[in-house]
Image (spheres, helix red, strand yellow):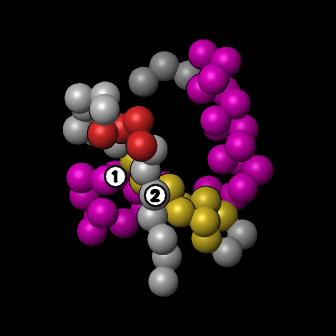
Amino acid sequence: MTQWRKSFHSSDSGQEGCVELARLPLAVGVRDSKAPEAGHLALPVRGFAELVARVKRGELHF
């Protein structure tokens, strides 16, 4: 069974929109915590690491 996790910071932020992550075989799963039944994205581990790095550097704006 896949174990989905979200940051403990998300409950303190006052925001309802959070993502959940899961370790999948050969990938990282990403899904909307408010709509887990809608499915998930499976990102290659390397691609997920690059995404996180780009967000931290401020290269992506949401």
Find residue 1 and name its label.
none
43 left or right of 38 in image = right
48 left or right of 19 in image = right
Residue 30: give x, y in percent of width and height.
Answer: 48, 55
> Residue 10, can we see it?
yes
Q: Which quarter of the figure is the C terminus placed in?
A: top left
Displayed quadrant of residue 59: top right
Residue type marked 2: Arg
Neighbor class of circle 1 (other Cα within 10 Å; few <14, some 14-19, many 20+) is some
Residue closest to the eye, 1 or 25:
1
8 left or right of 37 in image = right
Residue at 69 percent of width and 58 percent of height: 44
Residue at the limit of the structure toward the right, as seen here? 46
The boundaries of the magenta stretch are 30-58
Query: Given this view, does label 1 or label 2 mark the residue nearer the observer?
Result: 2
Asked if residue 23 lies in the magenta stretch, the reply is no
> Residue 41, can we see it?
no
Residue closest to the eye, 62 or 6:
6
Residue 3: give x, y in percent of width and height.
Answer: 48, 71
Residue at 66 percent of width and 27 percent of height: 54
Quickly name the residue at label 2: 5
Residue 10: give x, y in percent of width and height.
Answer: 36, 38
Label 1: element kind: strand
Asked if residue 37 lies in the magenta stretch, the reply is yes
